[in-house]
Image (cartoon, helix red, strand yellow):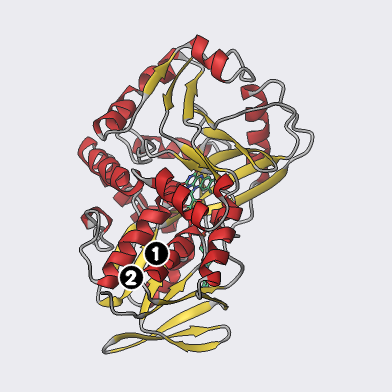
Amino acid sequence: MIASQDVTLIGAGIVGVATAIYLQRDGHRVTLVERDRPGEATSFGNAGSLAPGSIIPLALPGTFGQVPRWILDPLGPLSLSWKAAPALVPWLMHFRRACTPERVRRSAAAMRSLNRDSVDTYEELVATAGAPELVRRDGMLQLYRTEAGFVASEGSRRIRLDNGARVEVITEADIRRLVPALSPEYRWGFSLPDGGNVRSPLRVTQVLAAHFQANGGTIVNARVDDLETDAGGVRALLTSEGRMTVDRVVLCAGIWSRTLAARIGVRVPVASERGYHIHIPSPGIALDRPVTDGERRFVATPMEGGLRIAGTSEFCRVDDAPSWDRADALASLARSMIPGLDTSDFARWCGPRPSTPDGLPVIGPAPGNPKVLLAYGHGHWGLMAAPATGQVISDLVAGRPPRLDIAPFRPDRFD
Ligand SMILES: Cc1cc2nc3c(=O)[nH]c(=O)nc-3n(C[C@H](O)[C@H](O)[C@H](O)COP(=O)(O)OP(=O)(O)OC[C@H]3O[C@@H](n4cnc5c(N)ncnc54)[C@H](O)[C@@H]3O)c2cc1C
C-alpha cells in the first residue's frame, strides 16, 4: 500500500505528462504546473520516433575533433553559434570526456534500459487514454547513399546489437521494395524492425494530459519563477499566479529546468541543442514508415496531417533568433531524398532539445534537496524515454526500488 502524497510537477511536456500519469496511478494527488499549454514546447516538434535501438549518443570517439568544423559551417547537420560558445565551454569539456568507447558503451546500455519497452508502454498509454491510433509499429529504416557512410555505421550497429536491439542489414532491392518513393541514390542501409512512431507528438501529450485531468489530476496554468526552501527542503513554488505550497516536487521543464535547478544549487550541464522541422501537409507521395538519412542526419516521418522532416543540431542560446535557412535546407534535403516530394507548402518549426554531454537525462533526487526530483535533459530521445522516466520517478516517490538501475542518470554525475 503506497501512502498518498501531494506531488507537484513543473512543466507539462511529454516528460511531465507521462510522469504525472504514473504518479496518479499510484494514488498520489498530482498537480502539473505549466506556463503555456501541455505539449507545445519541444515536445510539439519532434520526429515522433520510438526506436528502442536508437541508443547511440552524440558524444562518440572522434566527434569532439569536429567542433571547429561545426563552428565554421552554420548549415551543417551540427552547428555551434559563436555567441553560445563561451557558456558552452564546461559542457564541451564534459562532452569531450564522454567521447571514449567505454563511456559510449555505458551510455548506450543505460539508454537501452530506459527505452527498451517504449513502444509497448506508449501503446498502453494511448489506448488507455482512448487514442490507440496515435502509435504505430512500422519499424524504422536508416539509409546511406555511400558505401563508406554505411561502413562507418558498423560500430554503432554493433553497439545496438550488443544491447539486444534488432538490427537488420537491408539490400538495395529491399530499399526499392520497402520505400518506392525514395531516390535510387540510397543503396545501403539497415532496419530497426522493433521501432514505432507516434502520428502526432502534440496530440500524444494533449491526449495524455486530458486523460490525467479526467482522472482527477490538476493542471495549473502558471509560470514557476522560483522555489522557496527552508531547512526541510522545498516548501513552496513562487509562480506568476502567486505562492503555491508544495510537498514533493518533480522538475521536468525541459531546457528551462536548468534555471530553476540553479535556484536550489543544482548545476547539471544541459545545453540547448536546437532542432528544426518542416511539416508538409500535402507531400504528394506516400511514405509508410520513418526513414533516416544516416549521413545527412535527418528523418522523414509520416504523421497525421502530412510528412515531417526533422533534424539538425544547433547549439545556441535558448532565445537566439531561429536560423530559418536551416529549415529551408531540410526542404531541399527532403527533395533529394524523395524526388517526387511536393514542397510548395510547408510549416517551419524549431525547438530546444535539453541535451546533456553524455546524452542521458538526469533522473533522481536533487543533490541536497531530496524532496525535489529531477527529470530533464532528455536530449534527442525525450519522447521515447518519457514513460520510463515517469515510471522511475513514481518508484522513487513511492519508496520502491526503481525498476531499472538509475546510477547512470544520477544528477551529480558531472560534479
Ligand atoms: C527536431 C527534433 C526532433 C526530435 N525527434 C525525437 C524523436 O524522434 N524521438 C524522441 O524520443 N525525441 C525526439 N526529440 C527530443 C524530444 O522532443 C525532447 O527530448 C522532449 O520533447 C523533451 O520533453 P520535455 O517534456 O523534457 O520538455 P518540453 O517539451 O520542452 O516541455 C517542458 C515544458 O515545461 C514548461 N515550462 C518551462 N519552464 C517553465 C516554468 N518556469 N514554469 C512552468 N512551466 C514551464 C514549458 O512550457 C514546456 O511545456 C526531438 C527533438 C527535436 C528538437
- Please state which of the two labelled residues, at mark 2 or mark 1, is closer to the viewer: 1
Which image quarter holds the C terminus? bottom left
**Badge 1 is on which residue?**
22
At label 1, which amino acid type do we have? Answer: Tyr
In the picture provided, is 257 more to the left or to the right than 229?
A: right
- Taking depth in this image into account, of 45 and 267 the one nearest to the observer is 45
**Badge 2 is on which residue?**
373
Look at the numbered disc 2 and say if its residue's Cβ is closer than 8 Å to ligand 1: no
Write the residue at 79% across / 34% down.
344
Q: Residue 366 location in percent, x, y? A: 29, 71
Q: Earlier in the sequence, mark 2 or mark 1?
A: 1
Q: Residue 84 location in percent, x, y? A: 49, 55
Which image quarter holds the N terminus? bottom left
At label 2, which amino acid type do we have? Answer: Leu
In the picture provided, is 412 more to the left or to the right than 222?
A: left
- Taking depth in this image into account, of 406 and 332 the one nearest to the observer is 406
Q: How many marks?
A: 2
In the picture provided, is 59 more to the left or to the right than 319?
A: left
Write the residue at 35% across / 41% down.
57
Q: Residue furthest right?
A: 344
- Quick one: label 1, few (<14), some, or many (20+) residues within 10 Å? many
